[in-house]
Image: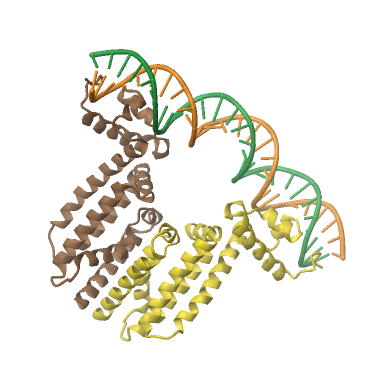
Chain colours: A yellow, B brown, C orange, D green
Amino acid sequence: MPRTGLAPEELKRRAVEVANQRIKTVGYSKLRVTDVAAELGVSHAALYAHFSGKAEILDAVVGHWLDMAQEELRAAVSGPGTPEQRLENWLIQRLRLKRQAALKDPELYEAYCQATDRLREVVLRHKALWRDQIAMLLTQAIPDLKDPAHAARLVQSAMYGFNHPRLVLEYLDTEAEMIEDRLRDVLHTLIAGLRSIS
Amino acid sequence: MPRTGLAPEELKRRAVEVANQRIKTVGYSKLRVTDVAAELGVSHAALYAHFSGKAEILDAVVGHWLDMAQEELRAAVSGPGTPEQRLENWLIQRLRLKRQAALKDPELYEAYCQATDRLREVVLRHKALWRDQIAMLLTQAIPDLKDPAHAARLVQSAMYGFNHPRLVLEYLDTEAEMIEDRLRDVLHTLIAGLRSIS
DNA sequence: CATCTTACAAGTTACAGATTTTGTAAATTG
DNA sequence: CAATTTACAAAATCTGTAACTTGTAAGATG
């Protein structure tokens, strides 16, 4: 019988919640698993029964944040407008979410940047997910598209300069509208290109 | 009369040369203006008569390196092939130069990265120069292109994910061919798009 | 009198020892 | 016996201090 009176899953959930909160308040670099454990009222060693280490806790926090973002993006996919407009919306929305996160919770965003730098599995999983979404929208936007997966990778490559977490940070003090206009420009030119080639 | 027996310009040239060499050997972060001065046989304060500070020396080193790169790229512009091929060549060449620099002189490349991070004037000047070259080649590749400057900015935006100094570093252990193929893909799709819109 | 040196304040880095933190294993508890 | 704790080694971080660097100013020199 667990002395915390919590099911393992519940404890994990709470640990992630506490870690998330602490990153926001004390900062990413000062997150200590000792403190998280203390706040949960257990010894730090107890957490090692549920997480393989600090990295896995961080991954869970970042994963949770990515899941939230994923959820918000779903709306753009099934929203109104032509497929091309929806793809544009989706890409713009993704960029805005990152910028907002970087402004509102810089420390949490830093955790995401670090996870990206280290190519953590959480981030790779979401990148693949995003590529699938782009492929789907592209297929709708360009009916006779030959290789959606290839085209999606192409679009993602061209968008990397707008979407890379660190570059988003770099542009944070640039007018959002200017960046979004450029993104749209690149996207529409690419789509025109893909249409003319198909 | 200068007690070094050197004209100001000559001393500046030598200082940059020494700084360049020292970055390569002892590393960017360990470059001391004291050491540069010592190697030139003058007191460190003497350099402050010629440079406004350490940053300006670094800028001169990076500027010199960028000028070399610029020189090497000129060949691609006036090389053989269709304008589209020349543009492709030029972009690929630019990427390769960076990758080679990052591999061969990592510390010097780090200086360049830092200069980019801090948006030093040297780097901005060269970015504008590059954009002009792209605009020129685009004009040749797409005869009835309406707004070459705008198109060049578009291409540069889409290429940013390939060309940003830090991202080049990030991809350093990825197969060059794979990245170059993606770059070509993006470029040709953009050109196809620009053609179909014009 | 332009060029350089010495002298100096303010800031930065280097380093060594103390303290914390991380992660593991053996012991404990319900 | 699963969940947790205590105990502990290894790694990372903090702290205080000495040495070094940067940049400035006042003075020296050809």
Q: In the visual, does B29 lie left or right of A63? A: left
| Residue beneath the point at 25% across and 29% down | B11
Where residue B59 appears, as percent x and y from the top left, is 31, 42
| Residue beneath the point at 22% across and 71% down | B191
Where residue A189 appears, as percent x and y from the top left, is 28, 74
- The number of numbered badges drawn on the structure is 0
Where residue A30 appears, as percent x and y from the top left, is 61, 51
Q: Which of B124/B110 is in front? A: B124
Res A157 seen here: no
Where residue A3 appears, as percent x and y from the top left, is 81, 64
Quarter of the image for residue C28 reads: bottom right
Res A71 seen here: yes
Quarter of the image for residue A44 reads: bottom right
Tell me if residue A126 comes above or below residue C10 in the rendering. Answer: below
Tell me if residue B196 comes above or below residue A18 in the rendering. Answer: below
Tell me if residue A134 comes above or below residue B132 in the rendering. Answer: below
| Residue beneath the point at 38% across and 48% down | B118
Q: In the visual, does A89 lie left or right of B138? A: right
The quadrant of the picture occupied by the C terminus of chain A is bottom left
